[in-house]
């Protein structure tokens, strides 16, 4: 699984001109699912995202996590994170098929909720307009393949 995590002051997603989800301070998460990804990877990625210490403490250091700032998550499905860009027109055969991707997208969001976080979201496969006020900006790229065996606090 791949996630682009952006620290935001606020973010929202509209579908058909209507707000489908919105948050104040927290993370906008663009989430892509690969064909070999598993529920265990979704849970590990949720743990990593929810634990990221990228919010500033009283000394201006990125030392606080989502819980410490009372933040929420806006999760948007993003199959284009698996784009094959060897040619000028990207191919998307590296992304999981919808039946696999939807299940793991939902599992990721459920795992974030199980950790006590408010989770808003888009609609899988919909044409969405995503708005965000980036904070910093701070944007982190996470890939479960690169996280194999990774630990840390």
Image (cartoon, rainbow, N blue to C red):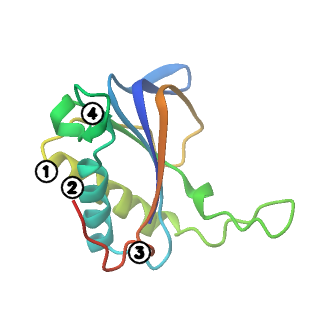
Q: Nearer the viewer, residue 131 or 145?
A: 145
Relative placement, left or right, of 122 versus 127 is left
Density class for disc 2 (Cα within 10 Å; few <14, some 14-19, many ≥20) is: many
Q: Which of the labelled discs sits on residue 111, or is there none? A: 2
Mark 2 or 4, nearer chain start: 4
Which secondary structure lies at badge 3?
A: loop
Q: CA distance from mark 2 to mark 4?
A: 13 Å
Mark 3 or 4: in front is: 4
Whole-percent x, y for residue 133 in the image: 49, 23
Q: Nearer the viewer, residue 117 or 92?
A: 117
Disc ID at residue 114: 1
**Image spot of residue 13 (x, y percent):** 47, 29
Q: Are marks 2 and 1 in contact (CB under 8 Å)?
A: yes
Distance from the alpha carbon under mark 3 to that under mark 2: 15 Å
Name the residue that disc number 3 marks.
Answer: 37
Residue 132 bears which disc, if any? Answer: none
Pointer 3 or 4: first along the chain: 3
Picture residue at 54% right of the left edge, 48% below the top? 125
Categorize mark 4 by other alpha carbons within 10 Å: few (<14), some (14-19), many (20+): many
Q: Where is residue 112 drawn, in percent x and y?
A: 22, 49
């Amino acid at each position: 699984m791949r996630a682009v995590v952006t620290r935001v002051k606020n973010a929202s997603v509209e579908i058909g001109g209507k707000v489908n989800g919105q948050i104040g301070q927290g993370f906008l998460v663009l989430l892509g699912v690969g064909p070999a990804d598993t529920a265990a990877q979704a849970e590990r990625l949720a743990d990593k995202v929810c634990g990221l210490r990228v919010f500033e403490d009283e000394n201006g250091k990125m030392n606080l996590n989502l819980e410490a700032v009372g933040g929420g998550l806006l999760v948007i499905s993003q199959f284009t994170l698996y784009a094959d860009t060897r040619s000028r027109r990207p191919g998307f055969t590296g992304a999981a098929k919808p039946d696999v991707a939807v299940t793991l997208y939902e599992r990721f969001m459920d795992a974030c909720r199980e950790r006590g976080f408010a989770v808003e979201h888009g609609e899988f496969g919909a044409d969405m307009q995503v708005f965000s006020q980036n904070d910093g900006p701070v944007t982190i790229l996470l890939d479960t393949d690169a996280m194999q065996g990774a630990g840390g606090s």
